[in-house]
Image (tube, rainbow, N blue to C red):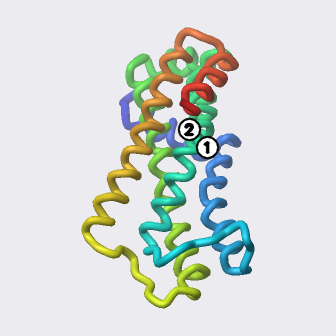
């Protein structure tokens, strides 16, 4: 069995698992904030002008810096590696595929795929929320205010993605030697810094 078949199988499993539905929580933050801002809630305030890209990047930063993104991806990584190892499913997959490194690398890439997919879904949702609810109350609306903001937002977003991937790497390494419960607790502690 080749690597691409294993990758396709792992990505399919990643999308169809019940725990993968947790990643709809990523799009909830910009939605709730936009609706609260539009309804005039005191909990949602914006000072000054903000671009659509700035709003989306600040939503991702809030998810990353609070540790919420890290905790969700820790849960995903533990279910991908630790839970299948504890249940014996991973031995069956390795016996069927005959190559341990291909199976582990396919599992790892499917976790990274979900990280990138959730980032893109949150970003598209935040830009949509900006133009539907937030931009109505602003005089000047724009996607990006300039090259400096573009570089700043892309850099900060990529650094948060790298931080989440590093936490997931540590959890994956722990899952090879420890039980799922311990890996989940350690990953939550690590993601909270």
Give residue 132's position: percent from left, percent from top. 58, 82
Marks 1 and 2 close (CB-CB < 8 Å)? yes
Q: Is residue 28 left or right of residue 1?
A: right
Give residue 9's position: percent from left, percent from top. 50, 37
For this orientation, the residue located farthest to the top is 177
Q: Is residue 77 left or right of residue 155?
A: right
Instruction: Inspect this view and state whether residue 58 appears.
Output: yes
Residue located beneath label 2 in the image: 70
Instruction: Inspect this view and state whether residue 83 appears.
Output: no
Residue at image position (65%, 67%) is 33
Whole-Å distance between the Cαs marked 1 and 2?
5 Å
Q: Measured along the vertical axis of the image, is residue 130 above or below residue 66?
A: below
Q: How many marks?
A: 2
Q: Measured along the vertical axis of the image, is residue 24 above or below residue 135?
A: above
Residue at image position (52%, 86%) is 138
Secondary element at image label 1: helix
Give residue 128's position: percent from left, percent from top. 53, 75
Q: Measured along the vertical axis of the image, is residue 108 above or below residue 148?
A: above
Residue located beneath label 1 in the image: 68
Local packing at callout 1 (Cα closer than 10 Å; few below 14, some 14-19, many 20+) is some
Q: Nearer the viewer, residue 49 or 112?
A: 49
Q: Is residue 156 left or right of residue 107?
A: left
For this orientation, the residue located farthest to the front is 47
Give the quarter of the figure containing the N terminus.
top left
Local packing at callout 2 (Cα closer than 10 Å; few below 14, some 14-19, many 20+) is many
Give residue 7's position: percent from left, percent from top. 43, 36
Give the quarter of the figure containing the C terminus.
top right
Secondary element at image label 2: helix
Residue at image position (54%, 73%) is 47
Q: Nearer the viewer, residue 170 or 6?
A: 170
For this orientation, the residue located farthest to the bottom is 139
């Amino acid at each position: 069995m080749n690597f691409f078949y294993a990758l396709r199988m792992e990505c399919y499993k990643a999308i169809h698992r019940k725990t993968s539905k947790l990643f709809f929580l990523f799009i909830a933050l910009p939605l709730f904030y936009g609706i609260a801002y539009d309804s005039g809630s005191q909990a949602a305030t914006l000072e000054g002008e903000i671009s659509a890209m700035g709003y989306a990047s600040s939503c991702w930063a809030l998810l990353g810096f609070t540790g919420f993104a890290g905790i969700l991806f820790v849960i995903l990584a533990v279910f991908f590696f630790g839970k299948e190892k504890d249940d014996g499913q991973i031995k069956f997959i390795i016996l069927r595929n005959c190559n341990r490194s291909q199976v582990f690398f396919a599992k790892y890439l499917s976790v990274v795929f979900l990280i990138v997919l959730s980032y893109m879904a949150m970003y598209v949702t935040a830009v949509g929320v900006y133009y539907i609810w937030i931009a109505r109350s602003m005089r000047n609306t724009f996607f990006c205010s300039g090259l400096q903001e573009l570089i700043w937002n892309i850099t900060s977003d990529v650094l948060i993605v790298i931080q989440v991937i590093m936490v997931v790497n540590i959890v994956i390494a722990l899952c090879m030697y420890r039980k799922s419960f311990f890996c989940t607790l350690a990953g939550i502690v690590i993601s909270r810094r």
